[in-house]
Amino acid sequence: MRPVAPPPVAPPDPPPPPRRRPTRRHAALAGLAAAALVAAALTVSSAASAADAVISQGKPATASSVENAAFPATAAVDGNAGTRWASAFSDPQWIRVDLGATATITQITLNWEAAYARSFQIQTSPDGNTWTNIYTTTTGAGGTQVLPVSGSGRYVRLNGTVRATAYGYSLFEFQVHGTFGGSNPPGGCGTTNAAQGKPATASSVQNAGFPATAAVDGNAGTRWSSAASDPQWIRVDLGSTQSICQVVLQWEAAYATAFQIQTSTNDSTWTTVYSATSATGGTQTLNVTGSGRYVRMNGTARGTGYGYSLWEMRIYTGTGTNPTDPPTSEPPTGTPVEPTDPRNPNFGPNTIVYDPSTPTATIQSRLNSIFTQQERNQFGPERYAVLFKPGTYTADVNLGFFTQVAGLGMSPDDVNLNGHVRAEAFWMGGNATQNFWRSAENLSVTLPAGVSVERWAVSQAAPYRRMHLRGGGNQIQLWNGGDGWSSGGFMADTKIDGAVVSGSQQQWYSRNSEFGSWSGSVWNMVFQGVTGAPPNHFPNPSHTVIANTPTVREKPFLYIDGTGEYRVFVPALRANSTGTTWFNKTPAGSSLSLSTFFIVRPGTPVATINSALSQGKNLLFAPGVHHVTSPIQVNRADTVVLGLGLATIQADNGSVGMRIADVNGVKVGGIMFEAGETNSPVLMEVGPPGSSADHAANPVSLHDVFFRIGGAGVGRATNTLTVNSDDVIGDHMWLWRADHGDGVGWSVNTADTGLTVNGDDVTMYGLFVEHFQKYQTVWNGERGRTYFYQNEFPYEMPNQAAWMNGSTRGYAAYKVNDAVNEHFAIGLGSYCVFTLDPSVVAERSFEVPTKTGVRFQNMVTVSLGGAGTINHIINNAGGTARAGAEIQYLNNYP
């Protein structure tokens, strides 16, 4: 960016509501999935202990009444949470199940629909006539109730005496847990469920509502559900090698006809201890003999057209030993990789972790030495992550290039720094337009006594994410404070108690944050889902305010739990959200032990990385530059790839840096991709060409993912990022063909296009694309959405003839394919500064089909210092940005 004087700044229409995608699922599947989601969303009123098997499923059931024939008593014992029993609208009513023989009853699980019982009893009987109460309540709260009980009988009855609503009683499932004829487990087998609460992973999930952990949470009202394909697996880490004597599988309606129970000591080589080829679902109690730390249900053939679905997977351990002639084992999926100790991980030498007992002088000395090295080091290979365990510290964190500072708490308020977390530009005379590549995350900051100003003077690729600046009288300045410019920043999931002052910051995107107030504007300030945002008014001042964020998940983050174990929290998908995920609320999402991650340190061969991925591992990249000569291949749904210290993947020898299969829920965060000297066809590819799977319920998401071509040396790539999968979310990305540094020149660091989107329903939040030699962004998919776009054309084309698109002068900054029928973009800025030949003209910044479904709002073009011309803003509409009329605005197109 080049600093220029602030522009004068007229008013926007409000943004349109986001368009909803047409469904691609068959109606039957949608109906079943909706019913299952309703069931999964029910609340749990009491925690389950290690439960015995469900012995009521499929047994004869009768009731005092039914609402109509669609809601029979048998629907409450069929194992399908999408069907239900519903009674007449009166009191009392009952439902009864005949177990077929006398059983010991240890637990009742009631999965209520919205019409529940406020007062009821659970009763048992030996003959269906004489009843004994084993549970009574007058304060039932509905949802999913897990009731520990003690009793026996052939018949079990729920007797409702007071309804909570005007409707009848309604149960999705009435589950009786117990045993017939004494203890279920074989001799010497314990009665404690060793799997409950342990780390669980799976080959895939149907969507974020059905995680692997739901099958080991002790709650028979939650479940794991996989993608609808074979094979699929779910795996539990027991934490140590144990003798396995029994596995209980409590299937939902979508069960396995063929599967194996497998054990492993190393999460790599698996031994089959039970095999089935004609299973019928329900609750299966499997007595086995084996040992291992890891236990896996490996499903190879489904019993339905849906995925595999388990309410619970329970594992019992004891004194059993392996058989003398063990079953044959599956071939290993790869050479075992270095395991990660979740309590003492090896993050490499450039990750520095502090705890509150560390002397303040020690912390400050190291922070100062890192900043001295990194203040000007924008193209060096050094990378640093400075992490603070929960507690209170006194520290002044001044961030230079390629430095991340982050807290290791579950909430930003778990780590408080009395001092500063700041970014300034004194190294460049106050000009912050090159303050790139640094980050502050998951911390709270209390400014020193008598100080009321924090500075975050940055431009691209410098996220201020999940932060809390305390003190209503304080302010955070988004420029260096009176001297110089900054140009393009990002803030998300952040709370600023006081004021945000943008000053000479030229453009900024704020998402899902909470501000005391905001003041200032230059060209393009966009606020989305932000409480405390200024009024919507564009372009004078240039404030674009969008009430909420349609669909987003926050970036995964590293933290330490109460036991001292490192874990990664994966925030849940949110719809139509405002504000932070964490302030005065409990974040929704799932937690993964760091033992499920392979730590990639610089020098790790790509074959080892891919071997770890093939073994079901997630990836954590340590700070540094990681050279690859073949693609990192992410094939498993829900894989997490997280970088520390802006870890950089450099594609050498013309390689692709990373390819992601067309699967659900992969998350990539905190990674930079860099081109090598030999041209790469693309640096990152999300989904192979032709991808078409629907990922709306669990999309791939990219968080703080940056790309660089040149600057540190010669780099070349035809395309930079290509998105072929549907529903992908981009959450803050900068794609940059270098305009300064080493290896820079029109015929040196060659790159045609920054971003190419071929998938449908792709959404970008905070998209920065600069200096590519043809189209900066090409959008071929339907129903794309972009919220905030910042662009600069290339600087250094030698003349107009070198930059022609056929007979058109130059290439648009943002091209929507003529065949696209629906697209929405809002808050877009495009700039030119043609340094070698100011007579060069870009015909337009935005080139789109003129259709009612294609809408662009709140656009600005700028000729920086009058060096070059942008003839039109969008198609042939909008004024000409040129010397003497440098800034042009347009509110709507068409």
Image (cartoon, helix red, strand yellow):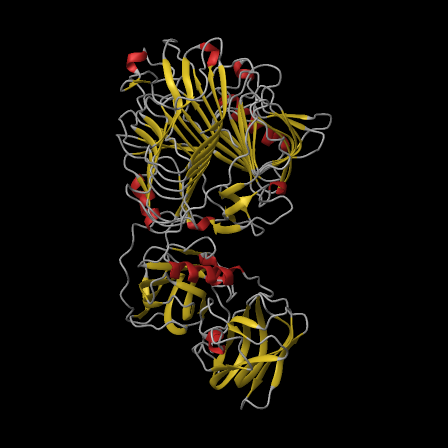
Above or below — where is 124 with respect to 498? Answer: below
Seen at 57% across and 46% down, the residue is: 410
Above or below — where is 610 with respect to 78? Answer: above
Residue 832 image-quadrant placement: top left
Foreground residue among 545 and 140: 545
Residue 108 image-quadrant placement: bottom right
Measured from the top left, where is residue 396 in percent x and y?
62, 28
What is the total number of numbered labels drawn onto the structure image?
Answer: 0
Measured from the top left, where is residue 430 in percent x and y?
56, 15
User: Is 160 on the left-hand or right-hand side of 427?
Assistant: right
Above or below — where is 606 with respect to 276? Answer: above
Seen at 28% across and 43% down, the residue is: 690
Measured from the top left, where is residue 365 in percent x and y?
58, 27
Q: Looking at the rendering, in which quadrant would you find the C terminus?
A: top left
Measured from the top left, where is residue 699 in percent x and y?
42, 46
Residue 411 in view (yes/no)? yes
Residue 680 image-quadrant placement: top left
Foreground residue among 384 and 808: 808
User: Is 508 on the left-hand or right-hand side of 211?
Assistant: right
